[in-house]
């Protein structure tokens, strides 16, 4: 008896539901999106379809979970539900319900549709022509701001904490620096956003610009101490790990250049004259890079350090020799004095020393 009751309970809902299927209309809910995933700020449309397009249906929309329809979305009663700029909070399971306004009243729920809104991420990539990713002065570098998902209508901004302030709002995410310098060796990040909505920021990226050639060092040969009448050679030295890169040198005196741009790192001033006196320097560049300036050297150079060295070495010898000569003279003079004193009876000694 108890078993019969149990079966009856099981069968009753099954019979009821099969009776309903006779007149049941198919309500299909679809998510209309571009691409595979939905990201925050995307425009999302849910479309509710029913086979019987003739009846004047009223649509109700619900946001809930897999198990229940949840709560009705207020103020929406068309067959489509569009969210212009979706947020992650709008993730959930959606259902539509069609409702026949005129009798016989009929109501049917659609299938559930899950909407998963992923967070927008912004990434800043640094693209250089070197396969190993290194960046040298003079290189063209692209800073690319990437946003996942649909980016129609998005704008991009590049920010830096360096001295440059040239990166403005743009419709595409690529920012190009035609010739990077060491001044670009700083931190960058980008922001992307749509309309007046909040901007998403990328991580901070350091632009690691390596030296293509070192700051030049000017030396004077044979020595900056050597001046008038000599041939004085200026040598401008800069290091590079790229021997194929042609370094271009130029030499200057005070503010004026004294040579054309040259591939030679030496410049000779023939027979240095008084009017050549001055401060000399050079600069170096590689095609497409900024010039780098050397130290300045005064020619001829008069430094207290050099003078001190002169006194301590050469003059010590000279002083020593002078002292020795004085000593010999003193001995001779004193001998003559005593000879004079004792000269009265001794003429032969007087003749030998011949002091008179
Ligand atoms: C930029 O930021 C980095 C890291 O926070 C810091 O080390 C650097 O000094 C900053 N540069 C300038 C010019 O503010
Ligand atoms: C300077 O150089 C010129 C040309 O190379 C040479 O003829 C001359 O002898 C040199 N003068 C001195 C003082 O070395």
Image (spheres, rainbow, N blue to C red):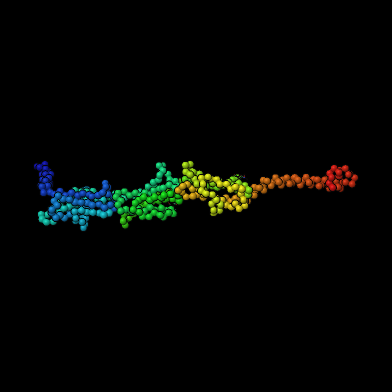
Seen from the viewer's position, the closer of residues 183 and 216 is: 216
Position of residue 343 measured from the top left corner of the image (x, y, whole percent): 88, 46
Residue 321 quadrant: top right
Position of residue 70 measured from the top left corner of the image (x, y, whole percent): 21, 52
* Number of marks present in the image shown: 0
Image vertical order of residue 2 relative to residue 46, above or below: above
Which residue is outermost to the right? 345
Tell me if residue 65 can be seen.
Answer: no
Seen from the viewer's position, the closer of residues 90 and 69 is: 90
Position of residue 228 measured from the top left corner of the image (x, y, whole percent): 63, 49
Position of residue 65 measured from the top left corner of the image (x, y, whole percent): 22, 49
- Point out the quarter of the image occupied by ligand 2: top right
Q: Quadrant of the N terminus?
A: top left
Residue pictured at 25% horizontal, 49% vertical:
33
Seen from the viewer's position, the closer of residues 21 and 260 is: 260
Seen from the viewer's position, the closer of residues 30 and 257 is: 257
Residue pictured at 43% horizontal, 49% vertical:
179
Left or right relative to 226: residue 239: left
Image vertical order of residue 321 relative to residue 78, above or below: above
Tell me if residue 50 can be seen.
Answer: yes
Left or right relative to 98: residue 137: right
Left or right relative to 5: residue 71: right
Residue pictured at 19% horizontal, 56% vertical:
77
């Amino acid at each position: 008896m108890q078993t019969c009751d149990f079966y009856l309970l099981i069968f009753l809902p099954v019979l009821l539901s099969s009776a309903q299927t006779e007149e049941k209309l198919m309500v299909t809910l679809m998510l209309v999106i571009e691409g595979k995933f939905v990201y925050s700020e995307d425009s999302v449309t849910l479309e509710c379809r029913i086979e019987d397009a003739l009846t004047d249906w009223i649509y109700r929309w619900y946001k809930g979970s897999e198990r229940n329809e949840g709560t009705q979305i207020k103020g929406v009663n068309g067959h489509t539900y569009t969210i212009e700029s979706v947020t992650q909070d709008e993730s959930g399971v959606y259902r539509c319900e069609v409702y026949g306004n005129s009798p016989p009243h009929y109501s049917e729920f659609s299938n559930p549709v899950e909407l998963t809104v992923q967070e927008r991420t912004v990434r800043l990539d640094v693209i250089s022509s070197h396969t190993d990713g290194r960046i040298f002065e003079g290189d063209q570098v692209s800073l690319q701001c990437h946003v996942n998902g649909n980016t129609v209508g998005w704008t991009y901004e590049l920010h830096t904490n360096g001295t440059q302030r040239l990166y403005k709002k743009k419709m595409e995410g690529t920012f190009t620096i035609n010739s990077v310098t060491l001044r670009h060796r700083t931190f960058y990040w980008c922001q992307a956003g749509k309309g007046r909505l909040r901007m998403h920021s990328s991580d901070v990226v350091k632009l690691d610009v390596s030296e293509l050639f070192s700051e030049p060092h000017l030396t004077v040969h044979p020595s900056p101490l050597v001046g008038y009448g000599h041939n004085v050679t200026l040598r401008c030295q800069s290091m590079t790990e790229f021997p194929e890169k042609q370094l271009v040198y130029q030499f200057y005196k005070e503010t004026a250049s004294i040579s054309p741009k040259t591939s030679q790192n030496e410049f000779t001033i023939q027979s240095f004259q008084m009017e050549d006196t001055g401060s000399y320097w050079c600069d170096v560049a590689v095609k497409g890079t900024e010039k780098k300036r050397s130290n300045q050297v005064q020619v001829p150079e008069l430094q207290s350090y050099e003078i001190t060295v002169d006194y301590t070495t050469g003059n010590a010898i000279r002083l020593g020799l002078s002292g020795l000569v004085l000593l010999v003279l003193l001995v001779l003079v004193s001998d003559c004095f005593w000879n004079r004193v004792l000269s009265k009876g001794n003429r032969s000694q007087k003749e030998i020393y011949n002091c008179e």
